[in-house]
Structures are given as structure tokens and as C-alpha cells.
Image: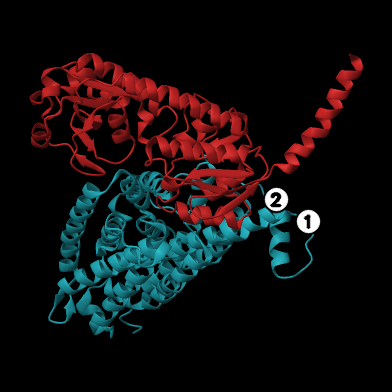
């Protein structure tokens, strides 16, 4: 493979060094964001108290005093929320990078696979039709089933003689997205005022519903995506040359495509189910990193997961602190920050960066 | 005299703590959860009618937080945001000794999870019966529960008696002929829904001596033909809605309105925006409407 190694893997030494730096800095940035997010919120808990509460959870002596309510807020509300933000962000980041690689298209994001639209339709339908089979988890369960169903449908439609045709998948995705949009429209038409508001707020996204059972139910799926997608990096690098060339390089192209689609569907679907639709993270994060580390997916995929997690933890921190005691839906923050930043990248670097 | 004053003061001093210690109300919420509280000092009152009822009981100084709907009487109480998406930590940050909401609002979106989070953090949450059903009886029920919580049964009885007086006035002022009425929930010139036969709008129409012409529950989008078929004698809008469509002349341009009996006679009425949640002003709104109808529907 040495002679025919794709350009991305023979990057200039400068970019390579950049990549190492980024992979060292990003975990530290994520850790910093988590510490900041855990220590800030509407209820004042000082850093010493945060430490004391965590230590006392482990049965160790606490250096500072805290009351039971602070402990309950930290462990029952804030920690699961930060954990969910990191998880969902990591899933969105890694999935976005993998999708852009798979489609060889800078505008690809998990939404193209029908993940958000399918989840939106199923969520709206579960609210309007009164689906309550799983109690408090009925809406997330419906949303997850909706994303998987929609992605499955698009993938099957994109099949040509056992192979996934990426262009057909893109077009099928657009059509199915439109169909889901119509279905969601029908549901909002049928909805009562209360149901309409539930649907609207779900679509704006929020980590406010984070509970440990919710986080733990999403964690295996999201982590599977964020941890296993980087394993497809070599194949994605080869795919940048084109499918035929990748196949000549020994990449099992069809199997790789199915693997990526499955991992993206599982990880993003699980994230969307618990947090609603959160836009722009999957689109912007890989772009930003490509500027810093170059197009090598071996760096890009893990870095996107780390940066996605960091950004979503920080976005949620903003969502829950700027208008206390109220909260902003996080989808508003990611779009407000993400869209102008995307335009800035576009203007500054032109199409070459994309 | 001096002696007597001193005696009275010491008696009062003795009685005060004894009273507040004795009074710890045990109240069963609409969700079946029983809450035991001494008269609360810091209350987060969610839903417009909860805020209004607490004001009527003279305990408004205890309200430290509300949601976007809690705007009447005009106040500067901090809002925790939209009632359909309540923030657990934001509510706890107001350091309430009691959170009071209604079953309808707590059922919206993720709010039931928020109630669980609040309780897990040791915050007492009282769930009142739904504010969008039960009409006047529902208001009385919620009033009595709140009076128990605050230990002010006298204030609730006085308010309840004033309800009886106003109700008698409403009945005496009803129109001779009951008009067929449609309640339009309008957001703008091309966007209006009809309120169905449940909720505060229906209670208002019935109390004021009208007949709700809507043949369905919940809300339905207004279509010109449906409205002409229903052919109401009177049309009610929210103040906000009437403003949004551009006054009575604008309302007449809504699809189908001009072709109804109400439209031809310009029988368009406006009521307070808060009617969506049934609160203590229901009868005042009904009385005003009944008086207008009594004049307009003599025959």
C-alpha cells in the first residue's frame, strides 16, 4: 500500500505535526469544557463544593461543606446533562466527518440520511397519536425508531445490485426528507395547541431532559459510533480517490459503506432521540478541523468526535446560563453560532477549504 | 390600658409561632402525591391562573418565580421561561420552598421529567388540577387547595362568595335568545383556528348565555366553508387576536366571516387573552359578554 497510498496519508510533515498537536489539545479542551460546565449553572455550587460532592460520592472525606440539594442538583441534573452533551456532540461530530468522507461532499451531514427528518416525523406522530407504550421514553423510542427506519429505507432505495450508490442515496435522501417533512406537517396540523408546543420544542433540541437512565440508554449506541467510526478512516482515505481506486487498494467498498451508514444511524439516531434535532455540529466541526489537520480521516474522525463533544457541552452551558432562570433551546445556539461561522469559513477560504 | 396592650402583644407573640407551627397543611395533588408544607414563603407559581389565585388570596409577596404566562396582575416576578419547557435547575435556583403548577402544564413535553427531577432534589411540588378544564368549579377547587396551603380559608371563602354574587349577575344579564357562537383563535389575517367544545372558551360562551356552535373538541383550523356552514350569530376573538387581524373590519375579512350572520351584523366580540387558562376572572369576562349580548340579542 506504500506506493499507492492516497495523498491524504502522505500529508506534508507540517500538517502531520499539526494533527498530533490537535489530538493532544482536543482532549484537554474537552476536559476543560466539562469542568467548566459541571461548575456553572443556575444553582451556585463552588468548585470546592463540586469536588467535595464528587469525593463524598466515592466515600472519601469532603474538604468543603455542601447541602443535600446542591448534591442532588449536581448528580441528578447537571452531571447527566453534561455527559449527554458530550455524548451527543461526539456522535454528531464523528458522524458528520464520516458522512462527508463517504459522500465525498463537503455539505453532507447525518441529516441527509433522513436521521433528523425520520426522528421528527416519528416524534410528532407519537405526540399527536398518543403513543405511550414506553412511558417517559415513548417519544425518544419513537424518534430512534423513526431515524433508523428512515435511514434504512434510504439505504435500501440507494442499492444497485447489492451495492450502495452514493449519488442515488443523496437523491433518495432528499425525497424521503421531503416526505417526512410532509408527514410532520400533517401531524402539526392535527395537533392540539399543547401538542404543537411539545413538537416545536422537541425540534429545537434540548439537553434539559437528561437523566442517568436516558444517558445510559443512549451511551452504548453513541459511543459505538464515535469509537468505531475512526476504524473506517483508512477506507475513507482510499475512497477520496474514487470507489474503483479504493477497491483496487484492497478496501471492501460496499461493506465499508454499510458499516458507516449503520454506525452513523445508530449513534446519531440515539442522540437525536434523547436531545431532539441539533443542527450544524455535524456540518461545521469537520470543516474546522480539516483546516487545522488536513483531510486525513485517521485524525479527522477522532478529532471531530472530541471537538463535537466540546462544542456541544459549551453550547449547552450557554443555553442554560444566559437567560437564567429560564433556558434557551440548544438548537438555537448551535445554529446561531454554527451558521455564521460556516459563512465565515466559506468567505475566508473559498471553495478550496470545502 | 398599658397593661392590656402588653398583655395583648405578648399573647400575639405567643400565638404567632404556635399558629405557624400548628399549621402545616397536608394537601393531596392532582397527581396523587401528597405535599405537607408550612405556609410557604418562596413559591414558584407556574401557570397564569396559579399566579392570579395567589394574588386573590393576598399572598402574592410569596411568589418568587413564574412562567411566561404569569403576567396578570402586572408584576416583575422573574420568569423561568415557556410553560411547555420548564428548566429544573432554573426553578431550583430560585430556592423555592414550594413549586405549584397545574396538571395540564406539567403534562406538556418533558415537564413530567422535570417534576421528578425537582422532587429528587428535595423540592416540594404541588400539582393542581388542570387549568384548561372544569370551568368555574375547577377554579373553586384550585382556590380551596391554595387556601389550604397558605392557611387562609377565610380569603378563599370570601372570594368564593364574590363568585356567587357575580354568577347571579351573569345569570340575570344573559340574553333573551341564546346566540350561536364561534370562538376564533386568530394569529393574523390568514391564520385562525376555532376553539372546540372543551376548555375555557367553551365555559365562557356557555356562562354568558350563548351556545358554542363548534361541533368538535380541541382546536381546528378555520376554513371559510366550515364557518359559513356553522353560521354563528356572534364571533369572539382574543384581544390580541382582534388586534392581530386589524380590528373588527379586519376580522370581517377573515375567510367566511363576512358571509355569516355574525359578520353581516358586525357581532364581533373580544375577551382577555388569558381565557385559555380558566382563572378567577372567568365570571368577570362572562358578565361583560352577557351584558353585550343582552343588548345585541333582544329578539
Separation of residues labelled 2 and 1 (CA atoms): 9 Å
Q: Which chain is red?
A: B
How many C-alpha atoms fall within 10 Å of the one at disc 2: few (<14), some, or many (≥20)?
Answer: some
* Residue A140 image position (x, y, % from top left): 38, 63
* Residue B245 makes an appearance in the image: yes
Element type at mark 2: loop
Q: Please give the name of the residue rendered at 23% of the width and 80% of the height, measured from the top-left corner.
A: A254
| Residue A299 lies in quadrant | bottom left
* Residue B256 image position (x, y, % from top left): 10, 29
In contact (CB < 8 Å): disc 2 and disc 1: yes
Residues B247 and A246: in front is: B247
Name the chain letter of the residue that bears numbered label 1. Answer: A
A79 left or right of A268 in image: right
Element type at mark 1: loop
> Can marks 2 and 1 be said to lie on one chain?
yes
Task: Give whichever of discs 2 and 1 has the lower sequence position.
Answer: 2
Q: Please give the name of the residue rendered at 35% of the width and 22% of the height, measured from the top-left corner.
A: B170
Q: Which residue is mark 1?
A: A64
Up-down relation of residue A294 to residue B67 (above or below): below
B260 left or right of A125 in image: left
Q: Which residue is mark 2?
A: A46
Name the chain letter of the residue that bears numbered label 2. Answer: A
Up-down relation of residue A201 to residue B276 (above or below): below
* Residue B251 image position (x, y, % from top left): 19, 23
Up-down relation of residue A4 to residue A178 (above or below): below
Residues A301 and B158: in front is: B158
The N terminus of chain B - image quarter: top right
Amino acid at each position: 500500500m506504500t506506493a499507492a497510498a492516497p495523498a491524504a496519508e502522505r500529508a506534508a510533515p507540517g500538517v502531520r505535526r499539526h494533527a498530533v498537536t490537535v489530538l493532544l489539545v482536543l482532549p484537554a479542551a474537552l476536559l476543560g469544557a466539562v469542568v467548566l460546565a459541571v461548575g456553572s449553572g443556575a444553582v451556585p455550587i463552588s468548585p470546592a463544593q463540586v469536588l467535595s460532592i464528587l469525593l463524598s460520592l466515592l466515600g472519601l472525606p469532603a474538604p468543603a461543606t455542601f447541602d443535600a440539594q446542591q448534591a442532588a442538583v449536581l448528580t441528578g441534573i447537571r452531571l447527566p446533562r453534561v455527559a449527554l452533551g458530550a455524548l451527543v456532540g461526539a456522535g454528531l461530530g464523528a458522524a458528520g466527518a464520516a458522512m462527508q468522507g463517504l459522500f465525498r461532499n463537503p455539505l453532507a451531514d447525518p441529516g441527509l440520511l433522513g436521521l433528523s427528518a425520520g426522528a421528527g416525523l416519528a416524534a410528532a406522530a407519537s405526540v399527536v397519536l398518543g403513543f405511550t407504550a414506553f412511558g417517559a421514553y415513548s417519544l425518544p423510542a419513537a424518534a430512534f425508531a423513526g431515524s433508523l427506519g428512515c435511514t434504512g429505507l434510504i439505504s435500501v432505495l440507494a442499492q444497485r445490485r447489492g451495492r450502495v450508490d452514493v449519488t442515488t442515496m443523496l437523491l433518495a435522501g432528499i425525497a424521503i426528507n421531503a416526505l417526512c417533512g410532509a408527514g410532520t406537517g400533517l401531524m402539526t396540523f392535527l395537533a392540539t395547541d399543547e401538542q404543537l408546543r411539545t413538537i416545536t420544542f422537541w425540534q429545537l433540541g434540548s439537553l434539559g431532559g437528561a437523566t442517568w437512565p436516558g444517558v445510559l440508554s443512549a451511551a452504548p449506541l453513541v459511543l459505538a459510533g464515535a469509537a468505531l467510526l475512526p476504524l473506517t478512516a483508512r477506507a475513507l482515505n482510499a475512497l477520496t480517490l474514487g470507489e474503483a481506486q479504493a477497491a483496487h487498494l484492497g478496501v471492501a467498498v460496499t461493506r465499508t459503506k454499510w458499516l458507516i451508514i449503520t454506525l452513523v444511524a445508530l449513534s446519531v439516531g440515539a442522540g437525536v432521540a434523547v436531545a431532539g434535532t441539533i443542527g450544524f455540529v455535524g456540518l461545521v466541526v469537520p470543516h474546522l478541523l480539516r483546516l487545522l489537520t488536513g483531510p486525513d480521516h485517521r485524525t479527522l474522525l477522532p478529532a471531530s468526535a472530541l471537538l463535537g463533544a466540546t462544542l456541544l457541552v459549551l453550547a449547552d452551558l450557554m443555553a442554560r446560563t444566559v437567560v437564567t432562570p429560564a433556558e434557551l433551546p440548544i438548537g438555537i445556539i448551535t445554529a446561531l453560532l454554527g451558521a455564521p461561522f460556516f459563512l465565515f469559513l466559506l468567505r475566508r477560504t473559498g471553495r478550496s477549504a470545502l | 390600658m398599658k397593661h392590656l396592650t402588653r398583655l395583648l402583644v405578648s399573647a400575639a407573640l405567643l400565638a404567632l409561632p404556635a399558629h405557624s407551627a400548628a399549621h402545616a397543611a397536608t394537601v393531596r395533588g392532582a397527581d396523587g402525591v401528597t405535599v405537607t408544607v408550612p405556609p410557604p414563603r418562596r413559591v414558584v407559581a407556574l401557570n397564569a391562573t396559579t399566579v392570579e389565585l395567589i394574588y386573590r388570596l393576598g399572598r402574592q409577596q410569596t411568589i418568587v418565580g413564574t412562567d411566561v404566562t404569569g403576567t396578570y396582575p402586572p408584576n416583575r416576578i422573574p420568569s423561568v421561561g415557556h410553560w411547555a419547557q420548564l428548566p429544573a435547575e432554573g426553578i431550583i435556583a430560585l430556592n423555592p420552598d414550594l413549586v405549584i403548577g397545574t396538571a395540564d402544564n406539567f403534562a406538556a413535553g418533558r415537564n413530567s421529567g422535570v417534576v421528578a427531577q425537582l422532587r429528587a432534589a428535595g423540592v416540594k411540588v404541588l400539582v393542581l388540577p388542570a387549568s384548561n378544564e372544569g370551568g368555574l368549579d375547577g377554579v373553586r377547587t384550585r382556590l380551596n387547595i391554595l387556601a389550604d396551603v397558605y392557611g387562609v380559608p377565610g380569603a378563599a371563602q370570601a372570594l368564593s362568595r364574590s363568585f356567587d354574587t357575580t354568577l347571579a349577575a351573569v345569570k340575570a344579564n344573559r340574553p333573551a335568545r341564546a346566540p350561536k357562537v364561534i370562538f376564533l383563535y386568530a394569529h393574523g389575517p390568514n391564520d385562525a383556528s376555532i376553539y372546540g367544545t372543551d376548555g375555557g372558551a367553551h365555559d365562557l360562551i356557555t356562562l354568558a348565555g350563548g351556545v358554542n356552535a363548534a361541533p368538535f373538541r380541541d382546536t381546528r383550523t378555520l376554513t371559510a366553508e366550515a364557518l359559513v356552514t356553522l353560521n354563528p350569530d356572534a364571533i369572539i376573538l382574543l384581544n390580541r387576536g382582534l388586534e392581530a387581524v386589524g380590528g373588527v373590519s379586519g376580522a370581517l375579512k377573515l375567510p367566511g366571516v363576512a358571509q355569516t350572520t355574525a359578520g353581516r351584523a358586525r357581532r364581533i366580540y373580544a375577551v382577555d387573552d388569558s381565557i385559555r387558562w380558566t382563572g378567577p376572572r372567568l365570571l368577570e369576562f362572562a358578565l361583560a359578554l352577557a351584558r353585550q349580548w343582552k343588548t345585541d340579542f333582544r329578539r
